[in-house]
Image (cartoon, rainbow, N blue to C red):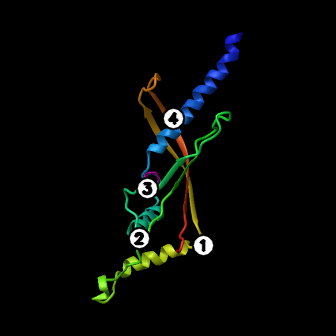
Amino acid sequence: ESGSDEEPVAVNEHLLDVKRDGGAYLMEKRNIFTALQRNVNKENNVAEQHLIDMLCMSGCNRDDVWGFHALERRARASPPSRSCISSIALVLLKTGINHTAGNTKPVDVDYTQMATAQKLLLFWRKPARKCWWDGIEVDLPAQDGRSSRQFKLWARRVWTLELSLV
Protein backbone atom coordinates (compact mmCIF):
# COMPACT_ATOMS: atom_id res chain seq x y z
CA GLU A 1 0.00 0.00 0.00
CA SER A 2 2.74 2.46 0.88
CA GLY A 3 4.46 1.67 -2.44
CA SER A 4 1.40 2.77 -4.39
CA ASP A 5 1.37 6.10 -2.55
CA GLU A 6 5.01 6.80 -3.46
CA GLU A 7 4.82 5.66 -7.07
CA PRO A 8 3.08 8.79 -8.48
CA VAL A 9 5.63 11.00 -6.73
CA ALA A 10 8.53 9.08 -8.35
CA VAL A 11 6.88 9.26 -11.77
CA ASN A 12 6.23 12.98 -11.31
CA GLU A 13 9.88 13.59 -10.26
CA HIS A 14 11.08 11.67 -13.32
CA LEU A 15 8.84 13.76 -15.58
CA LEU A 16 10.13 16.97 -13.99
CA ASP A 17 13.72 15.79 -14.57
CA VAL A 18 12.91 15.17 -18.24
CA LYS A 19 11.38 18.66 -18.54
CA ARG A 20 14.39 20.29 -16.88
CA ASP A 21 16.80 18.32 -19.06
CA GLY A 22 14.78 19.23 -22.17
CA GLY A 23 15.04 22.91 -21.26
CA ALA A 24 18.78 22.60 -20.64
CA TYR A 25 19.18 20.83 -24.00
CA LEU A 26 17.35 23.63 -25.81
CA MET A 27 19.48 26.25 -24.04
CA GLU A 28 22.55 24.73 -25.72
CA LYS A 29 20.96 25.28 -29.16
CA ARG A 30 21.79 28.94 -29.76
CA ASN A 31 21.56 29.28 -33.56
CA ILE A 32 18.81 31.66 -34.64
CA PHE A 33 17.67 30.02 -37.85
CA THR A 34 18.07 26.28 -37.13
CA ALA A 35 14.51 25.59 -35.91
CA LEU A 36 12.89 27.83 -38.54
CA GLN A 37 14.98 26.25 -41.31
CA ARG A 38 14.00 22.77 -40.06
CA ASN A 39 10.34 23.84 -40.27
CA VAL A 40 10.87 25.27 -43.77
CA ASN A 41 12.41 21.98 -44.90
CA LYS A 42 9.64 19.91 -43.29
CA GLU A 43 6.73 22.02 -44.59
CA ASN A 44 8.41 23.17 -47.84
CA ASN A 45 7.34 26.72 -46.99
CA VAL A 46 8.69 29.05 -49.68
CA ALA A 47 7.50 32.23 -47.91
CA GLU A 48 9.46 31.42 -44.75
CA GLN A 49 12.54 30.53 -46.79
CA HIS A 50 12.19 33.91 -48.51
CA LEU A 51 12.00 35.61 -45.08
CA ILE A 52 15.23 33.89 -43.98
CA ASP A 53 16.91 34.94 -47.23
CA MET A 54 15.73 38.56 -46.77
CA LEU A 55 16.99 38.67 -43.18
CA CYS A 56 20.34 37.25 -44.24
CA MET A 57 20.63 39.80 -47.03
CA SER A 58 19.80 42.60 -44.59
CA GLY A 59 22.33 42.00 -41.83
CA CYS A 60 21.87 38.52 -40.37
CA ASN A 61 24.06 35.51 -41.11
CA ARG A 62 22.71 31.97 -41.39
CA ASP A 63 24.95 30.84 -38.53
CA ASP A 64 24.14 33.77 -36.18
CA VAL A 65 23.40 32.97 -32.54
CA TRP A 66 20.97 34.65 -30.19
CA GLY A 67 22.35 37.76 -28.52
CA PHE A 68 20.25 37.04 -25.41
CA HIS A 69 19.08 33.52 -24.58
CA ALA A 70 17.65 32.78 -21.10
CA LEU A 71 15.71 29.98 -19.44
CA GLU A 72 12.91 31.23 -17.21
CA ARG A 73 13.62 30.34 -13.59
CA ARG A 74 10.83 29.29 -11.28
CA ALA A 75 10.79 29.14 -7.51
CA ARG A 76 11.91 25.74 -6.25
CA ALA A 77 8.51 25.20 -4.60
CA SER A 78 6.64 25.38 -7.92
CA PRO A 79 7.63 22.63 -10.34
CA PRO A 80 7.88 23.63 -14.00
CA SER A 81 5.00 22.60 -16.22
CA ARG A 82 7.21 23.62 -19.12
CA SER A 83 10.56 25.22 -19.86
CA CYS A 84 10.24 28.74 -21.22
CA ILE A 85 13.20 30.20 -23.11
CA SER A 86 13.31 33.81 -24.27
CA SER A 87 15.77 34.82 -26.98
CA ILE A 88 16.48 38.17 -28.59
CA ALA A 89 18.75 39.22 -31.44
CA LEU A 90 19.35 42.78 -32.60
CA VAL A 91 20.74 43.42 -36.06
CA LEU A 92 21.74 46.64 -37.79
CA LEU A 93 19.69 46.78 -40.98
CA LYS A 94 21.74 47.02 -44.17
CA THR A 95 20.03 49.50 -46.47
CA GLY A 96 22.22 49.11 -49.52
CA ILE A 97 23.45 52.71 -49.29
CA ASN A 98 27.23 52.72 -48.99
CA HIS A 99 29.34 55.80 -48.32
CA THR A 100 33.10 55.92 -48.80
CA ALA A 101 35.41 57.19 -46.08
CA GLY A 102 35.72 60.96 -46.33
CA ASN A 103 33.00 61.04 -49.02
CA THR A 104 35.66 60.94 -51.73
CA LYS A 105 33.43 59.00 -54.14
CA PRO A 106 29.74 59.22 -54.96
CA VAL A 107 27.36 57.19 -52.82
CA ASP A 108 27.09 53.58 -53.99
CA VAL A 109 23.55 52.15 -53.91
CA ASP A 110 22.71 48.45 -54.05
CA TYR A 111 19.11 48.66 -55.26
CA THR A 112 18.35 44.98 -54.58
CA GLN A 113 19.42 45.35 -50.97
CA MET A 114 17.50 48.63 -50.67
CA ALA A 115 14.33 46.94 -51.95
CA THR A 116 14.77 44.17 -49.37
CA ALA A 117 15.23 46.73 -46.58
CA GLN A 118 12.06 48.50 -47.73
CA LYS A 119 10.14 45.20 -47.47
CA LEU A 120 11.44 44.72 -43.94
CA LEU A 121 10.30 48.27 -43.07
CA LEU A 122 6.75 46.91 -43.35
CA PHE A 123 7.36 45.30 -39.92
CA TRP A 124 7.91 48.69 -38.29
CA ARG A 125 5.16 49.10 -35.66
CA LYS A 126 3.49 45.98 -37.14
CA PRO A 127 5.33 42.94 -35.78
CA ALA A 128 4.79 39.60 -37.47
CA ARG A 129 4.41 36.40 -35.47
CA LYS A 130 5.06 32.83 -36.54
CA CYS A 131 4.12 29.95 -34.22
CA TRP A 132 4.71 26.25 -34.79
CA TRP A 133 5.39 22.97 -33.00
CA ASP A 134 8.90 21.63 -33.42
CA GLY A 135 9.43 17.96 -32.55
CA ILE A 136 13.00 16.72 -32.22
CA GLU A 137 14.57 13.49 -30.99
CA VAL A 138 16.88 14.10 -28.02
CA ASP A 139 19.66 11.74 -26.93
CA LEU A 140 21.08 12.70 -23.55
CA PRO A 141 24.28 10.95 -22.45
CA ALA A 142 24.63 9.40 -19.01
CA GLN A 143 25.75 11.96 -16.43
CA ASP A 144 25.46 12.78 -12.72
CA GLY A 145 24.59 9.18 -11.86
CA ARG A 146 21.70 9.07 -14.33
CA SER A 147 21.58 6.69 -17.26
CA SER A 148 21.43 7.92 -20.85
CA ARG A 149 17.97 8.87 -22.08
CA GLN A 150 16.18 9.30 -25.36
CA PHE A 151 12.94 11.19 -25.73
CA LYS A 152 10.91 13.21 -28.19
CA LEU A 153 11.01 16.88 -27.25
CA TRP A 154 8.15 19.06 -28.44
CA ALA A 155 8.91 22.77 -28.44
CA ARG A 156 6.30 25.44 -29.11
CA ARG A 157 8.25 27.96 -31.15
CA VAL A 158 7.08 31.57 -31.33
CA TRP A 159 8.99 33.95 -33.57
CA THR A 160 8.21 37.65 -33.52
CA LEU A 161 9.82 39.83 -36.15
CA GLU A 162 9.73 43.50 -35.29
CA LEU A 163 11.62 46.42 -36.76
CA SER A 164 12.61 49.31 -34.52
CA LEU A 165 13.98 52.58 -35.79
CA VAL A 166 16.60 54.14 -33.54
For label 1, the residue is: 125
Q: Residues within 10 Å of mark 2 (few under 14, many from 20)?
A: many
Give residue 160's position: percent from left, percent from top: 56, 61
Q: Quadrant of residue 123?
A: bottom right
For label 2, the residue is: 58
Residue at (46% x, 38% y) in the render: 137
Which of pointers 3 and 2 lies earlier in the amino acid sequence?
Answer: 3
Q: Amino acid at mark 4?
A: Asp
Residue at (43% x, 56% y) in the render: 33
| In the depicted structure, whether residue 57 falls above or below residue 30 | below
For label 4, the residue is: 21
Q: Residues within 10 Å of mark 4 (few under 14, many from 20)?
A: some
Quarter of the image with the N terminus is top right
Q: Which residues are magenta?
A: 34-38
Residue at (45% x, 75% y) in the render: 117
Judged from the image, the secondary structure of the residue bearing numbered disc 2 is loop
Give residue 152's position: percent from left, percent from top: 50, 36
Q: Amino acid at mark 1?
A: Arg
| In the depicted structure, whether residue 7 falls above or below residue 86 | above
Which of pointers 1 and 2 lies earlier in the amino acid sequence?
Answer: 2
Q: Is residue 165 left or right of residue 76?
A: left
Q: Is residue 156 left or right of residue 55?
A: right
Which of pointers 4 and 2 lies earlier in the amino acid sequence?
Answer: 4
Label pair 3/2, CB-CB below 8 angstroms = no
Which of pointers 4 and 3 lies earlier in the amino acid sequence?
Answer: 4
For label 3, the residue is: 33
Q: Main secondary structure of the magenta part?
A: helix
